Amino acid sequence: MVALAEKYEIKLGKATRDAFGEALRELGGQDERIVVVDGDVNNSTRTEWFAADNPDRFFNAGIAESNMIGIAGGLAASGKIPVVSSFACFILCNGFDQLRMSVAFPHLNVKVVGTHAGISIGEDGPSQMAIEDVALACALPGFTVVVPADEAATRAAVRAMMEHHGPVYLRVGRPKVPVVYRSEADAGFEIGKANRLRDGRDVTIVANGLMVSAALQAHDALAERGISARVLDVATVKPLDEAAIEAAARETGGIVVVEEHLAYGGLGSVVAMAAARRHACPMAFVNIDDTYAESGTPEALMEKYGLTSDDIVRAVEGLAGARKRG
Amino acid sequence: MATTATSAGVAPESGAPVGTGGTRSIEELEAIARRLREDIVRMTTKAGSGHPSSSLSAIDVMTVLYFGGFLRHDPKRPDWPDRDRFILSKGHAAPALYAVLGESDYFPRTLFDTLRRIGSPLEGHPNMRRLPGVEASTGSLGQGLSIGLGHALAARIDGRGYRTYVMTGDGEMEEGQVWEALMAAAQFRTANLTLIVDHNKAQQSNLVERVLDYRPLAEKLRVFHWHVEEIDGHDLRAIQSALSRAQEVGGRPQAIVAHTVKGKGISFVEADWSYHGKPLAEDELARALEELKN
Ligand SMILES: Cc1ncc(C[n+]2csc(CCOP(=O)(O)OP(=O)(O)O)c2C)c(N)n1
Ligand SMILES: [Mg+2]
């Protein structure tokens, strides 16, 4: 990410996993009901910071993700507020049936946190990259799915997640990410509410996670070419802020959805469904499409798999061309 | 006196050599293991990330398997149907696998320098679709023994004589799926399946006994109806005899509990489990290579 940030003179903030770890430690001291279960990766997910303060309310359940989810279900049914964490790929994929039967079906108050999401983890490669996690989480009835953009938004999201009653999936990443919000208050985070970061007339760019900063860069590049783009940070994939999508479709006439995720079942699918229902408009999608990635530096992977601000600009221009022809 | 390695190797139909040669003395195997250790630390330091300590604990067993005449395979024909299979279930030890595959001439050793780079088939974790010689795409712990059982059952159905070897980590043994596979393999009496547990006593966040203390491992495997060998996983002769005995066991799958040291061969890594997932810094690499010489 560093190279990108330098190119656009962007200020790098903390990794969203670090912000998660800090917020969890802070809230853990305030609410005795919070219990954390991790799977041998507490030094990567940063739950070790909560563990240091609250050894009695922390359990390292070993390399056994499905068991962790079941434990969380039981803790929640007995009045605790469990936070289960691991790499996003392992907690969602390995624990999916348990998420379905022990959490979603009984609608228990479990907070599932997946770190190291997306291809921006870099060198560890495809086996460690969650690129299907949002689709899986969205497929669970009653789940709230949150993908915050930066450090401040993550802190605010953790707070909101713990206050919310019901199952939540929070997706955070490994690398340091550009600062989008000056402070937690500035992030104005509310579950189910999209943030309009830039206004525009010609098109709307919908993004979440670390793609929000790329969308902001694309906004500036497009402005230089005379295209006025609205930018929406849709941190809550589910429930979606359908009103914001409808307004974008009506007022800007086209939507480009950007996410560090596969095409099927992610933010793009969810937004397209809402637009189709509320106010159909031409759309384009910037995502990983339908493939696994590979090892490489985060920057090289974001380029190769089409997740840069240039890719967003091209998608917007393609959409504009299609609209003119149409 | 130099002992010769047991040769269970039968040349494939093409008449190509087994691995990179026939039978080797213990001294020769030691020399290979030393060279592979150097490859492991060099390539991970060059890559700037990876799991050298997890690779170093596994490399002696893998050396005997690949170069001590046990694994029947043909680098020129990676898809030879009768080849023995080796599945590295603890996929993060990929540098160890790449070291033995490079030494076997599955690919030129110059590829070591591309580890974890974009475009390279030497990914952070093994990818069977990109690198010949890799039998399973791994990296999500707990899945390799089930895949190995599938290969073993296919051999039985097809009447083929190949064996399947699977290596797991000791932290990895915490995954429930491993125990599902253990029960199934015993039930299906897959005598052509051998599990090797790289019992290096540490996982990512701590020592295994401090995370989930499942000791004693060998006894657990025995009551799951497996034949069990318990050895020093850095004693090449002990590895040879355990692998030989495993081949003679009838009617049951075999497990070799290899007691190993995470980071074996490099004193400052051996002494510190928190090296998990960290490459050596340049100055550490120099010290490590110096130690490996002796
Ligand atoms: C299902 C799953 N959960 C978590 C991880 C993250 N992880 C990678 S290596 C590791 C520790 C492995 O310990 P062990 O099996 O003892 O192998 P060692 O490195 O000691 O050889 C963990 C937890 C993973 N790769 N897969
Ligand atoms: Mg271990």
Image (tube, grey):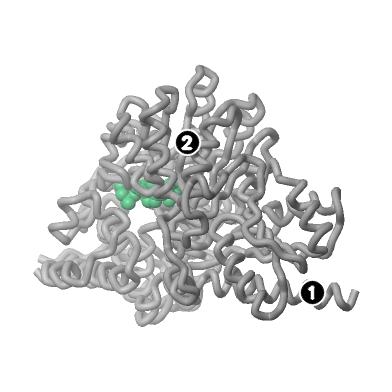
Instruction: Tell me the residue that label 1 is attached to.
Output: A320
Residue at image position (47%, 78%) is B76
Quadrant location, the C terminus of chain A: bottom right
Residue at image position (39%, 57%) is B92
The amino acid sitting under disc 1 is Ala
Instruction: Tell me the residue that label 2 is attached to.
Output: A84
Using the rendered view, name the quadrant where residue A96 is placed.
top right
- Residue A39, percent from left and from top: 41, 39
Chain identifier of the residue bearing label 2 in the image: A
Mark 1 crowdedness (10 Å alpha carbons): few <14, some 14-19, many ≥20: some
Most foreground residue, B166 or A249: A249
Disc number for residue B7: none
Residue at image position (51%, 32%) is A162
A156, above or below A178, in the image: above
Q: Can residue B258 be seen in this view?
A: yes
Q: Distance between the residues labelled 1 and 2?
A: 43 Å
The amino acid sitting under disc 2 is Val
Left/right placement of residue B132 relative to residue B263 reads right
Using the rendered view, name the quadrant where residue A27 is placed.
top left
Most foreground residue, A14 or A181: A181
Chain identifier of the residue bearing label 1 in the image: A
Badge 2 element:
strand
Using the rendered view, name the quadrant where residue B227 is placed.
top left
User: Nearer the observer, disc 1 or disc 2?
Assistant: 1
- The disc, 1 or 2, on the residue closer to the chain's N-terminal end is 2
Q: Is residue B144 visible?
A: no
Badges 1 and 2, same chain: yes
